[in-house]
Every structure is written in structure tokens, then in C-alpha cells.
Image: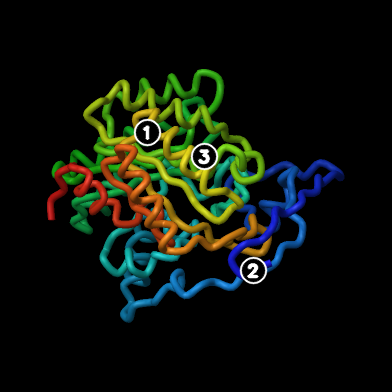
Amino acid sequence: MSDSVSKSIPLAIVGGDAPAPLQPGVKQLAGDKIGRSPVQFADAPVLRKPSWIRVRIPSGNAVAKLKEKLRANRLVTVCEEASCPNIHECFGHGTATFMILGEVCTRRCSFCDVAHGRPKPPDASEPSNLARTVADMGLKYVVVTSVDRDDLRDGGAGHFVECIAAIRAQSPGTRIEILTPDFRGKGRMERALEILAANPPDVFNHNLETVPELYRNVRPGADYQWSLTLLQKFKAQHSDVVTKSGIMLGLGEEREQVEQTLRDLRAHDVDMITIGQYLQPSAHHHPVMRYWTPEEYKHFETFGLALGFTHVASGPLVRSSYHADRSAAEAGLAVSA
């Protein structure tokens, strides 16, 4: 077995007594989070990180300064909660992806470092706090995402709209991208789309995350076709709004599966795509099965552009919100300097 490729990892079903009820706002992380999932991964070989995904930490204390401002306004970034490798670069440039609706997710995806648990009710002051921070930072492009909120009838769509409205009231020239959950559940997608129609963003982003063959182990609680339908229905309602999605590589997918996923996205009217390398947040999370090379990422960029995507960001350290402003501008959306 090479340093870059490993075989599929067998799965074991965990049994035992039912876990204790979750308390609102209490975070389950790493082993506590993944350990409650019905699917567990057996031991896997630890692959050495190749040179092309090593991150250089810039000098200065921009990260500490921005974190201080975020805490003062009771705001959370997905950059921190998901342990993004680009946090120093993005924070150093004064940019961040804001995560609304709390720090606790109702799902237990095996790739994700965001905590699982029973969320608290939405913070009614969050939209105004977010808008004030965006204005204070002078941001011309902002990305707003959230945890999954399966406990809410609209999946959090109403809170997204309140945040969009608040940002536009204080910073009318700022472009807004939202990265939403799938709004899965009886009547929830239709309800969410109706709510979002009242104040749509400039870019609508929803990540597929991986190929359909891996959903059961990577994205439990989600459905591949449901996510594609959400993207297509939003585009049908807002033909002038850019749609976007993202996937990770290194979870066990094959090249042909990735290419078919790109075809599926284009067939569902998605304009932009991000493709990046999955990095294991902890030993308890889904193992890295393969490190794809920069040349392979370049192949997917060329393949995606040939399919008709207006922009393809494909590289080992690419994340859904990484250089989102540049990607939007290159895709034809006017973004002020």
C-alpha cells in the first residue's frame, strides 16, 4: 500500500445502551460526536501529508485581533469551528466566513469538526451583530453559513434572510453569499425556498461534499438527490443569482465518480464549483483515504470548465469559501475592490 492510497476501511456497527439526552448548547466533539453515530470506522493507516498541503503560518497577530472582534459581537466563524487550514491567510486579510444559528449542529457528519448536539434557540440579536461587524470590517464580500438546524421548521431559512436584510441595510454595496444546509424534511425545502425568495443572496451555495456512493458513511442524514434538487429549484426561482457547490476529495472516491458528480451539478444548473482535499480533523473522524495530486486537481478544473461551469476552484487547499470574492468576480459577479 502506498503513502497516497489506502484500501476501503471496514465498518463496524456499534450497539449498546441508548445515550443520555442531549442538553441544549452542550457540544459533542471528536470521539463523543462520532461515537454516537451508528457507523464507526475501524483502524486505518495514517497517511503522511504531502508537501503540497502543508500550510505556512504568516507572521503577525491578525488572527487574534479578528477573533477578539468576533467574540465582542458574540459571532462565530466556520473558519474556527471547522478547523480550516486557511484560517491564518483569510484572517490575515480581514476576511471570514460567518457561521450563524449557533455552534452546535443537529447532524453527525463523519468528516466535519463542527460540534454536534442539541442547539439553543436562534439568537435574535445575531443579524444586527453580524451586520455591524461586516460594516466595521468594511467587507465588500461576505459569506454566511450555518450549522444544520433540523430542529427548526424552516431549517433556519428565516434567520438567513434576517441576516441578509441587516447586512444590506448597513452595507448596501456588500455582496452576500450564503452557504446553506440542505433544508431536508417534510415541507422544509419548499418553506425555505419561499422564505429565501423574499431577500435572496447574490450567491447561493450548498455543498454536496462528496460523491453519492459515499453518502452513507460521510454525510449521514443527507441525501444526494435532495441536495441537487435544492440547488436546481433555487436556480429556477432566481435565474440571475449565481449557484455554487463544493466537494472534497480523499474520502475514498474514484475519478469517474467525481466526474459524474460534476456532470450532475451542471445538469442541475449549478454555475460554480469548489474542489479541495479532505483533511481529517481528529483520529475519530473519517480517515483520509488518498491525497490527490495538484495535477489531478488541475484535471478536474479543466474537466469542469469544459462542462460549462463559469468558475472552477480546484486545488488541495481549496475550501468552499476560500477566495470566494475572487471566484465570484471571475464568474462574472461584480465585486467592489
255 or 209, which is in the foreground? 255
306 or 162, which is in the foreground? 306
Disc 3 is placed on an element classified as loop
Residue underneath mark 3:
148
Disc 1 is placed on an element classified as helix
Distance, label 1 to label 3, CA atoms, is 25 Å
Q: Earlier in the sequence, mark 1 or mark 2?
A: 2
Which x, y percent locates residue 96? 33, 57
Q: Quadrant of the C terminus?
A: bottom left
* Residue 42 at least partly seen: yes
User: Residue 203, labelled with which disc?
Assistant: none
Which x, y percent locates residue 258? 49, 44
Q: Is residue 122 above or below residue 281?
A: above
> Residue at coordinates 66% horizontally, 52% vertically from top-left?
33
Residue underneath mark 1:
266
Residue type for callout 2: Ser
Residue type for callout 1: Arg
Left or right of 191: which side holds 134?
left
Residue underneath mark 2:
2
Which x, y percent locates residue 25? 58, 48
Callout in the foreground (1, 3): 1
